[in-house]
Structures are given as structure tokens and as C-alpha cells.
Amino acid sequence: MYGSGYIPGLDYTKLNNSIAQEDPQKLAEFEAKIENGDKIEPHDWMPQQYRKQLIRLIEQHAHSEIMGALPEGTWITRAPTLKRKLALIAKVQDEIGHAQLLYAAAETLGKPREAMINDLLSGKSKYSNVFNYPAETWADITVIGFLIDAAAIVNQLLNSKGSYGPYSRALKRICAEESFHLKQGYEGFVYLATGSPKQRKMLQDAVNRWWPPIMHFFGPPNKTSVHSEKLMKWKVKMASNDEMRNRFLDQYVPKVWELGITLPDPNLRKNEETGRWEYTEPDWEEFFRVIKGDGPCNKERIAVRQWAVEKGRWVRQALFNPSAKYSLPVA
Amino acid sequence: MKSLDPRVNRLDLENTADAEVVQPNQCWEAFEVFVQQKQGGQHIHEGSLHAADYDMALVFAKEQFGRRGRIFNIWVVKSSHVYALAQNSEDMFANNREKKYRNSNGFKVSDKITQFKQEQKKLSE
């Protein structure tokens, strides 16, 4: 039975990342359930490592949604038409809404939302690296809306088939809205690509600048490890980083090329024999450097979040009800 | 720090103190949201949110779960007020899967009637 706090005694900070101490019979039942395609629900038994990895994954995803709104918001005040402005505002609101859905899903695993926000601000939790890059022109917004959202859909459609019920359900709702984001981004992209020479030049410049972060999006090639195999078996990770990158290239590179827009990698091509895409490995050192905080916009992104929490403090305090008890969402 | 976003440049980030570390007990409560999509339809559970009170929960629920298309009504319920079975309450659901006697397909008469008619026919011959 559960009301609030149906994970009694759970301390999310002390989750063990090894399965050595788990009850082998419960672990076998848990794995059989996943093998059978059943979902794991918040109050079901799960290994600590599963809980820990899912919290990390869903929390990072939630943070990415709110941080992603920042580069895109850059151009709300200067969108070229009323239609583009309305669509961009709607999209940015959706991203914040997605963060809310994802924080709720992560909370069902026992980590309070307040703790997740604290960890984002302190730098302890990460978010998608692409959002540490600046949106220099309006064309950047169309590249983000089209290609970054397309990459996110590839990832999220796969993850929506994952084993954790609340995350899977949140992603189904999110994917439906992301398809609007992709469509509106693609339309803006096509309008620039088929527009004046100046518009085409602006778009080509934005594509050139965003290509390395886009290639970074799915992360470095996976070294097969016992750890990653287990996450695949538990349906926490649904495909390798390279597999996802390949799916993305396969679906979207032709859509860029058919508009006469080039991609800044002379080695990019599909190997028709293997069906795989070949490309120059992006600069992974840059990727790790930016994750560690040394990207063009990391400081600004975190500072804006700091501002929002600090300036919202009096509102939270005014509304704070001292008798309110922390409660987890139920599903 | 000069931003490309004019809104960010207005924030005076340099002179803003670091945010306080929000404690888990400095929270708003969680609410479950039920949305009626069609007039006369059922209220269906759509998700949850955090709010300071019921009225705020309704406003947030409309933004979060009703910002596309027409919806007709919303209920919000404190998550802590939901009382439910554990997901794996096998004992509760294990017994008595055979419930044909509760359904219309558990009752058949056509064989009886056919047989009866055949017997009547034989008697009359």
C-alpha cells in the first residue's frame, strides 16, 4: 500500500552501483519481467543500480529540456514573423513542460525535485552538451529546431520502449509534441534554404557551426563494457551511441543535402554495402572539455538558472505552506 | 558576461547572488491531474505536478495538460491522498479468473433450443 513516500527508508544518495548485494531470486524475477516486455513501476522491486542509473538518465534529460529553452529563447524577441514567433514561444513552453514531466518521472524513483535543481546549479548533474553553444543568428534557431530536435526524437523514440513505466509514458507524450517542434524547425530551415542568397548563406553558416555539436549529440562511441551490456539488458539504454547516430544520419542528412546545403565533413557518406554512415570522428576532447564546464555558454546558462531560482525565492517563500509534506507523484 | 539574448542582458547576472540551496522540505506538494478531454467523457489521469495549493494546481494543470485543443474539465488531487494497492498485489487478483458467470457470453441457449425443436419434430412425425 502507498500514500506519500511509498519508498520508505530509501536514500537516493546511498544507492549502490553494484548488484553483488542484491537478492539473486528477486533479481532474476526482475530481469524475467523486463525480458517479457513488462514495465517496471515505481513501487516494484528493482536493483539499486537500476534505480541509480535511471535517476541519472531521466534527471539529465529533464535538465536538458530546461537548458535547451535558453539558446532557443535567444531569438524570441527577434523572430522574423508573427507565425515564427508564436511557434517558437509554443515550442519553448513545451520544452519546459517536458522538463516537468521528466522531473516527475525521476521523482518516482525517490530523488526530490528540489535536489535535482540544486545538483543542476552546483554542476553535479549534467545536461545535453549542445545547449552550451550559442544561437548566433535566426538560422541557428531553425537548425536547432530541425536537426537537434530530430536527434532528440531518434533518442526519445528508442527510450520510450524502455523498461521503466513512468519514463516510458512521459516520453510517449513528449514525442508527440517533439514532432511539432521538428516540423516547425524544418519549415523554417526550408524557407531559408529556398530563400534569397543572403538567407542561404546565413543558413549554411549556422549548419557549419552546429555540425560538430550535432555529431557530439549521441555521445562518444560506446566501448562495450559489462556495465553498458547490463543497461541494455535492463532496457535502460536501448541502443549504442553509434547506432543512434547512424539512424539520425540516415534519416536527416539526405533532407539537408537535397536542399543544396552542405555539411562540413568531406568524409561523410553512406556506405551502400554496409548500410552504415562513414564520417570523420568529431573532436571528442572538445566534447569532454565542454561537459566539464569550458564551453562557450556554460557559465551564462547556469547563471540564468541561478537568477531564476534566486529571484523566485520570495515567491516560493510567500507561497510556502509550512504544513506541506514532501510527497512523490504516484505514477 | 554579454549575452546574445537581450532578455538575459537585462538580468544583471553579475550582481545576482548565487541561488540558495533549496531544501527538500521547502517544497510544494505533488498533485495528480485528471483531464476530461470530451464533454461527458471520463476524467483520465494525465500526470502530476507540484503546486502550492489547489487553485495553483488547477492553473498549472491547464498549462501543462491542456495547452493544445479543447479540454472540458480538470480534477486535481493531492498525490499523498491517493490510496492504492501495491502494483504487485498478486494475492488480491490471483483468485477467481473464471468469471464467465458475470458476462453475457457465459450463457448459451441455442444448443438447447435446437435440440428441443428436433425432439418436438420427431414426436410429431
Image (cartoon, coloured by chain):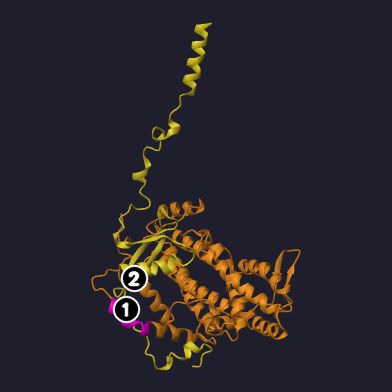
Front residue (pair A84, A304): A84
Q: Where is residue B12 in the image (x, y as percent from the top left)?
A: 43, 92
Q: Mark 2 points at which residue?
A: B56
Q: In this view, does A230 lie to the left or right of A221?
A: left
Q: Quadrant of the C terminus of chain A?
A: bottom left
Q: Mark 2: few, some, or many residues within 10 Å (few <14, many ≥20)?
A: few
Q: Residue at x 57, y 76 (%)?
A: A83
Classified by dominant secondary structure, the portion drawn in magenta counts as helix
Mark yes or no: residue A18 visible: no
Vertically, is A176 above or below A205?
A: above
Determine whether the residue tagged by mark 1 lies in a helix, strand or loop. Answer: helix
Q: Where is residue A169 in the image (x, y as percent from the top left)?
A: 47, 60
Q: Which chain is yellow?
A: B
Which residue, as the protein is rendered here, is positioned at the far top?
Answer: B125
Which span of residues is magenta-colored?
A309-319
Which numbered tag is attached to residue B3?
none
Which amino acid type corresponds to the residue marked 2 in the rendered image? Met
Chain for numbered disc 1: A
Q: Residue at x 45, y 53 (%)?
A: A28
Q: Name the residue under label 1.
A: A316
